[in-house]
Amino acid sequence: MTTLPGQSTVPHARLCSMDGPSEHPELWAFLESLHCGEILAGTVAAIERFGVFVGLDDGPDHFVFPGVGLITIPELSWRRFEAASDIVEVGQRVSCEFLQFDAWNLEARLSLRATQPDPFQAFADRNPVGEKLHGQVTKLVPFGAFVQVADGIEGLVHLRELAWTPVEAPSDVVQVGDEVTVVSTEIDRERRRLALSRRQGSPDLQ
């Protein structure tokens, strides 16, 4: 296995027993003292395919992992990205929100994105349902097309909403990279989903 610079070769497996705090009392005591929502500072210690290890400033070293804190991939950013290295780099200082104490791996589960404004909620505040938006087609799927209408904000135009006449495949009417006008038809804040209509955005479409 090839290891990239800044990456660790330590597999993230279940390494600790459930015997309690007797084997690693200092680490256990530190993790038990943390509270959900608490902001913790540290340094990115290693980047793995499943997440990012963080050495916490006020915490002891982990007995196996490169850091006592772990940010899983979904908790790195609100925005879409290809790799964890697109968001952070080894040696970078970060402030994260504490989510939970993983008693099996003896680590602190952290969230970097929780310390940042959610761009979807900000978008929803500014753009009510029914708003006409301009965007770019980013992806075609069998049931429709995804359109980016703001930085980091994508919505789905369902197949039936691509044109006024029936469409068998999205590629019949749009291609990736096309600039389109759409109307927002539903904003689901909880699931962070945006539904769009191209036909409502352009009544003259065939």
Image (spheres, rainbow, N blue to C red):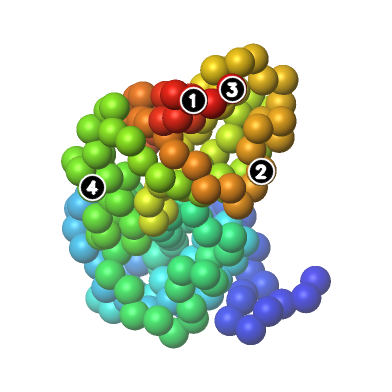
Instruction: Mark 1 and mark 4 in contact? Answer it, CB < 8 Å.
Output: no
Sort mark 1 into few (<14), some (14-19) or many (20+) by Cα contacts within 10 Å.
few
C-alpha span from label 3 to label 4? 34 Å
Q: Pick whichever of labels 2 and 1 is earlier in the sequence.
A: 2
C-alpha span from label 3 to label 1? 6 Å
Percent of width and height locating residue 184? 36, 30
Q: Which mark is residue 122?
A: 4
Q: Which mark is residue 204?
A: 1
Q: Nearer the viewer, residue 67 or 84?
A: 84
Instruction: Mark 3 and mark 1 in contact? Answer it, CB < 8 Å.
Output: yes
C-alpha span from label 2 to label 3? 16 Å
Q: Which residue is mark 3?
A: 206
Q: Nearer the viewer, residue 12 or 131?
A: 131
C-alpha span from label 2 to label 4? 28 Å
C-alpha span from label 1 to label 4? 31 Å
Q: Pick whichever of labels 2 and 4 is earlier in the sequence.
A: 4
**Mark in the foreground, 3 or 4:** 3
Sort mark 4 into few (<14), some (14-19) or many (20+) by Cα contacts within 10 Å.
few
Q: Is residue 187 left or right of residue 159?
A: left
Quarter of the image for the N terminus: give it: bottom right
Q: Amino acid at mark 3?
A: Gln
Residue shown at 34% from the left, 80% from the top: 93
Sort mark 3 into few (<14), some (14-19) or many (20+) by Cα contacts within 10 Å.
few
Q: Which residue is mark 2?
A: 175
For the residue labelled by badge 1, is the local secondary structure a helix, a strand or a loop?
loop
Q: Is residue 203 left or right of residue 10?
A: left
For the residue labelled by badge 3, is the local secondary structure a helix, a strand or a loop?
loop
Instruction: Mark 2 and mark 4 in contact? Answer it, CB < 8 Å.
Output: no
Vertical comparison of 180 with 49: above or below? above
For the residue labelled by badge 4, is the local secondary structure a helix, a strand or a loop?
helix
